[in-house]
């Protein structure tokens, strides 16, 4: 009997899911809303490159070409992903320009579903009590079609589609500003020539301090120099790591390895792993202090007032570290990037008002690199409120690894 699996998204996770289900003898169909594979790598900034060494970001059965540098740029990453899909003949299983409008489970009542323990896994990939109905819109013809499958794998990602926009008091949001306000998602969707033209000659303020904010600030500073410096408005300093090689080893190798995993307590860990993490806790502290000292010294963070209050370990445990672009602080020193800490801010006609300051930061363009609402994006794909509440809506809401059965 044919066992159909729906995979939502043709990024890296979607391609891996497709290859795996094929190897198990199932029939996968991958729905991708865009016209090509690659997920977030299909819409990036011109300066974007991989944050980790390539060997940490590699398919286990498909190594990188030896000609690719240690930190590949966005086009090299996308070429690698396309080569993987082509090599394993995954493209025939992908429906492009296919936007999933909703997922609905047809079978038991919502009350029965609430009593299930499938969210933690049962060992059985297919449930005999019902089927999943996937409503899909063809973005070219605008027609819709309903597919029925026995299993769903969500590979929609956390960092796209639903932007997180800060909330402001009435009359003090973007509507009060006479300039242009966009989210980093809109900037990434522009082709490189259009993006360069869009920021050229403008007094630009970028809000945020993660990877997107840093990359955009670098592009704005390259386009406009110190004549129209880019202001980088941030709430909290974070440990953003440079591409340095202490003892000839990429810094990322020191914390992206299996031994480092033993230093961290994990949900559901057994007694032995819990005991081991406790015993090794001095190493965790020492390692964190080494990275903090090394990065602070190499980037002269104290000179720029950018030493984070929290530890490196806290940042990396919260996934709040990113790769620091080359020459970032050189640009700060030369005046083409201006750092501005602002725990709270609002908009006015001329630009941005930082709480506690009388004069506004006059701007022509504000780019909000403030992240995405990954949970909301995931919730909205379901029709049933019961499944939505598994993600958002209760204190215990969760959906481990997006597993649906």
Image (tube, rainbow, N blue to C red):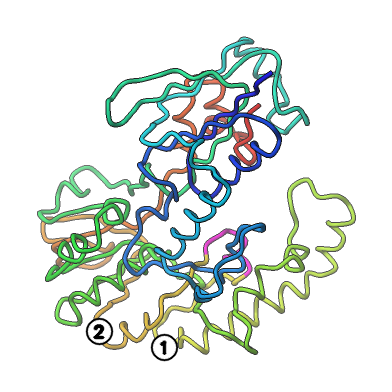
Q: What number is the disc on residue 335?
A: 2
Residues tagged 1 and 2 counted as in contact (Cβ below 8 A) = no
Q: What number is the disc on residue 303?
A: 1
* Magenta region includes residue 315: yes
Q: Nearer the viewer, residue 281 or 170?
A: 281
Quarter holding residue 75: bottom left
The x and y percentages for residue 177 are 14, 53
User: Which image quadrant: the N terminus?
Assistant: top right
Which residue does the image show at 31% across and 82% down from the upper left?
332
Image check: 35 left or right of 254? left
Image check: 399 left or right of 357? right
Closer to viewer: mark 1 or mark 2: 2
Image check: 200 left or right of 382? left
Q: Earlier in the sequence, mark 1 or mark 2?
A: 1
Secondary structure of the residue carrying numbered label 1: helix
User: Which image quadrant: the C terminus?
Assistant: top right
The x and y percentages for residue 8 are 50, 35
The x and y percentages for residue 64 are 56, 66
Give the dominant element type of the magenta stretch: helix, strand or loop: helix
Which residue does the image show at 58% across and 58% down from the upper left?
318
Which residue does the image show at 49% across and 45% down from the upper left?
157
Q: How far apart are labels 1 and 2 at the CA level?
A: 14 Å
Q: Give the magenta range.
A: 313-320
Mark 2 surroundings: few (<14), some (14-19) or many (≥20) residues within 10 A: some
The x and y percentages for residue 78 are 44, 58
Secondary structure of the residue carrying numbered label 2: loop
Instruction: In the rendered view, tell whether residue 387 sits above or below residue 314.
Output: above
């Amino acid at each position: 009997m044919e066992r159909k699996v729906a995979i939502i998204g043709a990024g890296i996770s979607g391609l891996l899911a497709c290859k795996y289900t094929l190897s198990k003898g199932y029939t996968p169909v991958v729905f991708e809303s865009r016209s090509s594979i690659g997920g977030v790598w299909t819409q990036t900034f011109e300066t974007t490159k991989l944050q980790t060494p390539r060997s940490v970001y590699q398919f286990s059965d498909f190594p990188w070409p030896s000609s690719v540098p240690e930190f590949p740029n966005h086009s090299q990453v996308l070429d690698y992903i396309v080569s993987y899909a082509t090599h394993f003949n995954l493209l025939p299983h992908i429906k492009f320009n296919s936007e999933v409008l909703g997922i609905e489970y047809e079978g038991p009542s919502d009350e029965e579903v609430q009593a299930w323990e499938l969210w933690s896994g049962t060992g059985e990939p297919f449930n005999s009590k019902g089927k999943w109905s996937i409503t899909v819109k063809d973005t070219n013809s605008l027609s819709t079609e309903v597919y029925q499958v026995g299993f769903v794998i969500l590979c929609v990602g956390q960092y796209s589609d639903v932007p997180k926009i800060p909330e402001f008091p009435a009359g003090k949001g973007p509507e009060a500003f006479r300039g242009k306000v966009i989210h980093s998602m809109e900037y990434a969707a522009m082709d490189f020539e259009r993006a360069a033209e869009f920021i050229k000659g403008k007094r630009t303020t970028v809000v945020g301090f993660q990877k997107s904010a840093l990359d955009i600030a670098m592009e704005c500073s390259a386009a406009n120099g110190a004549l129209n410096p880019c202001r980088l408005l941030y709430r909290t300093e974070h440990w953003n790591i440079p591409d340095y090689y202490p003892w000839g080893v990429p810094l990322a190798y020191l914390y992206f390895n299996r031994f480092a995993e033993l230093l961290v307590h994990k949900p559901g860990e057994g007694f032995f792993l819990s005991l081991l993490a406790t015993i090794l806790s001095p190493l965790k502290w020492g390692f964190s202090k080494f990275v903090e000292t090394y990065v602070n010294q190499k980037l002269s963070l104290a000179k720029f007032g950018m030493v984070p209050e929290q530890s490196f370990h806290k940042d990396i445990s919260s996934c709040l570290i990113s790769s620091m672009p080359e020459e970032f602080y050189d640009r700060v020193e030369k005046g083409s990037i201006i750092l501005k800490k602002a725990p709270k801010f609002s908009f006015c006609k001329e630009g941005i008002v930082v709480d506690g300051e009388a004069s506004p930061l006059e701007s022509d363009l504000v780019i909000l690199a403030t992240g995405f609402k990954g949970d909301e994006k995931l919730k909205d794909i379901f029709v049933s409120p019961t499944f939505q509440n598994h993600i958002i809506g209760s204190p215990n809401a969760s959906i481990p690894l997006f597993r649906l059965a």
